[in-house]
């Protein structure tokens, strides 16, 4: 019988206090929950958090210096998201072949360097757009992918709980990154802020991966191929893509980030345009982080107890209500409520992708199908800010885009109602296809 790595060593088997202490320290840092902690820490400065939440704070100072309109900044975010969508599947393939740590540590260094290089941006829109696209390209290794893979390798029975806790790092980042960016901006200007953000990302993420994230011991380089041949229930990626349900989910996970990310990226300019002081606007913006955490945990809790598409519809209604609250009010309390409701929807997105995919397509080609849906999702995160910026430049107001966003979410809700009323791969089936107990310690590095 293999020892449980989450339990302390038997001190009676040791030879003296010094050896006992060494074994306790070794056990503490071999616990699988350190992987969760490291993932939470790394995702605090993940690519989506940094690209989206820092840009909202830096947008106006950059536009003021260069005399640009908001479409330029919105196109930059869209390009960053598109290149991140391209890079994430590539990073996943490299991680499968080379290992989590090796690829992710290099990717973190490149991403941090690309952020710092933004401080050299000239007053040429094309150059700024190219630099932002490069930042998105190098961000693929600092996406949730490597952290999710590390947790999936370390946990089985409690994988959902571990994943939910780790992904709250995105919410912490949403709360902390805007305030930290504003602090850097006030003291260093926007150019210095980019350098400081890059350094912050490097230190936090590099330490998180270097100290706490590890590859499965003894796992073959082609682990994904082995998993796909292990008899897990589900469709192959090609089979899933040919089903109507895949495309329904793809459109849903395009629509939701268009709305929530489009609103979030432009939230600070939207509020300051209405006369709300920048400090209060950033405070409202930071409140999204707390609601994002709550949304992630609440969504996971509800998915275990209710039909998934119905839970998803609830998390479509919440941001739709938030967008309506933001349509025309300059009241700080009402805009805060609207921002929180949008944040709740933002917190549920990634959880819903993984859960609904596993229930409708199974686990056989989970990684590849997830990559397709997450790529669509990433495109939506860039398209939404572009739509907001274009609407503002064309009309001088965000109101037309916000009204359109309500319609976009209505479309997403309708498609969720069109999904099958029963899961092809329910919980009982999945349990039969995979182990129900935690993996032994020998599966960890």
Image (tube, rainbow, N blue to C red):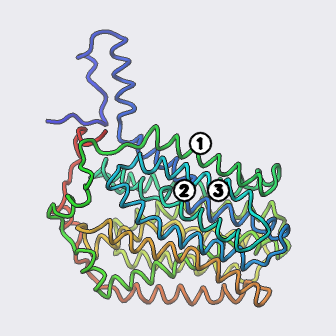
- Crowd rating for badge 3 (residues with CA inside 10 Å; few <14, some 14–19, many 20+): many
Residue visible at 23% across and 17% down?
13
**Direction from residue 320 to residue 357 in the image, left or right:** left
Farthest top residue in view = 16
- The residues tagged by marks 2 and 3 sit, at their Cα atoms, a distance apart of 12 Å
Residue visible at 65% across and 89% down?
403
**Direction from residue 340 to residue 305 in the image, left or right:** left
**Direction from residue 118 to residue 92 in the image, left or right:** left
Quick one: SS at disc 3?
A: helix
Residue visible at 35% across and 73% down?
356
The mark nearer the N terminus, 2 or 3, is 2
Front of the two marks 1 and 3: 3
**Direction from residue 278 to residue 51 in the image, left or right:** left
Q: From the image, tell me which residue sits under label 1.
A: 203
- Crowd rating for badge 2 (residues with CA inside 10 Å; few <14, some 14–19, many 20+): many
The mark nearer the N terminus, 2 or 1, is 2
Residue 272 lies, in percent from the top left, at 81, 71
Where 30 falls versus 240 (above or below)? above
- The residues tagged by marks 2 and 1 sit, at their Cα atoms, a distance apart of 12 Å
Quick one: SS at disc 1?
A: helix
Q: How many marks can you see?
A: 3
17 or 127: which is nearer to us? 127
Residue 372 lies, in percent from the top left, at 39, 74
Q: From the image, tell me which residue sits under label 3.
A: 115
- The residues tagged by marks 1 and 3 sit, at their Cα atoms, a distance apart of 13 Å
- Crowd rating for badge 1 (residues with CA inside 10 Å; few <14, some 14–19, many 20+): some
Where 196 falls versus 25 (above or below)? below
For the residues labelled 2 and 1, say whether their Cβ atoms are less than 8 Å apart: no
Specify the label residue 46 is tagged with: 2
């Amino acid at each position: 019988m293999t020892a449980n790595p989450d339990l302390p060593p038997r001190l009676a088997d040791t030879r003296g206090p010094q050896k006992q202490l060494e074994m306790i320290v070794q056990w503490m840092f071999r616990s699988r929950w350190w992987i969760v902690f490291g993932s939470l820490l790394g995702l605090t400065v993940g690519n989506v958090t940094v690209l989206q939440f820092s840009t909202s704070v830096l947008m106006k100072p950059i536009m003021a210096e260069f005399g640009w309109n908001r479409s330029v900044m919105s196109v930059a975010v869209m390009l960053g998201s598109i290149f991140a969508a391209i890079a994430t599947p590539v990073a996943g393939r490299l991680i499968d072949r080379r290992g989590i740590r090796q690829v992710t540590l290099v990717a973190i260094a490149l991403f941090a360097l690309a952020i710092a290089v933004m401080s050299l941006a000239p007053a040429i829109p094309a150059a700024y757009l190219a630099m932002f696209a490069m930042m998105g390209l190098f961000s693929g290794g600092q996406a949730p992918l490597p952290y999710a893979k590390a947790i999936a390798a370390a946990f089985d029975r409690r994988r959902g709980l571990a994943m939910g806790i780790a992904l709250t790092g995105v919410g912490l980042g949403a709360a902390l990154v805007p305030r930290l960016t504003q602090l850097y901006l006030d003291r260093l200007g926007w150019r210095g802020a980019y350098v400081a953000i890059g350094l912050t990302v490097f230190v936090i993420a590099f330490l998180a991966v270097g100290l706490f994230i590890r590859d499965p011991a003894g796992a073959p380089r082609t682990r994904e191929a082995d998993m796909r041949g292990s008899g897990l229930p589900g469709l192959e990626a090609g089979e899933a893509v040919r089903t109507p349900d895949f495309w329904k989910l793809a459109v849903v996970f395009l629509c939701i980030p268009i709305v929530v990310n489009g609103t979030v990226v432009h939230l600070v300019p939207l509020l300051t345009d209405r006369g709300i002081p920048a400090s209060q606007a950033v405070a409202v913006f930071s409140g999204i982080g707390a609601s994002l955490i709550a949304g992630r945990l609440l969504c996971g809790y509800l998915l275990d107890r209710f039909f998934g598409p119905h839970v998803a519809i609830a998390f479509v209604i919440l941001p739709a209500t938030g967008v309506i609250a933001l349509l025309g009010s300059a009241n700080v309390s009402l805009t805060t409520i609207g921002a929180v409701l949008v944040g709740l929807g933002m917190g549920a997105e990634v959880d819903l992708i993984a859960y609904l995919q596993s229930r409708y397509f199974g686990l056989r080609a989970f990684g590849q199908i997830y990559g397709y849906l997450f790529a669509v999702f990433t495109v939506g995160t860039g398209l939404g800010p572009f739509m907001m910026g274009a609407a503002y430049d064309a009309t001088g107001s965000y109101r037309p885009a916000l009204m359109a966003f309500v319609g976009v979410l209505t479309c997403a809700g309708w498609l969720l109602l069109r999904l099958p009323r029963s899961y092809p791969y329910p919980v009982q089936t999945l349990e039969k296809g995979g182990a129900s107990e935690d993996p032994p310690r020998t599966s960890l590095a």
